[in-house]
Amino acid sequence: ADRCGARGGGGGGNAALEAERALWQREKDRAEAERTAERAAAKTAAAAKAARAAVAAKEAAAAKAEGEKAAAASKALAKRLSAHMKRNVLSCETLSDDMGLGSSNQLGRWLRGASNATLEGRVREYLEEEASDCSDDEAAFKVAEAAEA
C-alpha cells in the first residue's frame, strides 16, 4: 500500500508538472506565433510603403517630364512668335494690340520665359490665323522657319 500511495502521490505530482509544462509550452508557442505574425505584418507594411514610394517617384518623374515637355513647347512657340515679329517688323505693343491683349507687358514677359497658359493659347491661335491668311509660298517659308526653330 505504501508503494501504491507513494507512486500515486508521485504520479500526481508528475501529472501536475506535465500539465504546467504543457501550459508553458502552449504559452511559448502562442507568443512565438504572435511574434511571427508581427514580423510578417511589419514586412507587409514595409513592402506596401516601398510600393507607394515607387509609385510616387514614378508619378513625380512623369510630372517632371510633362513639365519639361510643356516648357519646351512654350519656348518653341515663343521662338516662332519672335521670328514672326522680326519678319513683320512688329513690336510687342503692336502685336499686343493686334491680338487684343490690351497690355504689351504680358506678352513681353511671356516672350522672356514667364509662364502664362492663357496667353500661350492666344499666341498659338494668332499664329495659326496668320499662317492660314498667308500665301502658299509664305506658308512653306513659315513651315521651314518653324522647323529651324
Image (cartoon, rainbow, N blue to C red):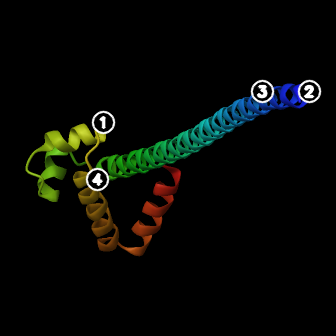
Quarter of the image where one finds residue 24: top right
Of callouts 4 and 3, which one flags the residue occurring earlier in the amino acid sequence?
A: 3
Q: Secondary structure at mark 3?
A: helix
Q: Residues within 10 Å of mark 3 (few under 14, many from 20)?
A: few
The residue labelled by disc 3 is: 13
Q: Is the residue 14 above or below the residue 81 in the image?
A: above
Of callouts 2 and 1, which one flags the residue occurring earlier in the amino acid sequence?
A: 2
Q: Is the residue 134 above or below the residue 68 in the image?
A: below
Where does residue 26 sit, x and y in percent of width and height? 70, 37
Q: Measure the C-alpha gap from mark 2 to mark 3.
A: 15 Å
Of callouts 2 and 3, which one flags the residue occurring earlier in the amino acid sequence?
A: 2
Q: Residue at x 46, y 56 (%)?
A: 146
The residue labelled by disc 1 is: 112
Q: Nearer the viewer, residue 5 or 51?
A: 5
Where does residue 27 sit, x and y in percent of width and height? 66, 33
* Type of the residue with mark 4: Glu
Q: Nearer the viewer, mark 4 or mark 3?
A: 3
Q: Secondary structure at mark 1?
A: loop
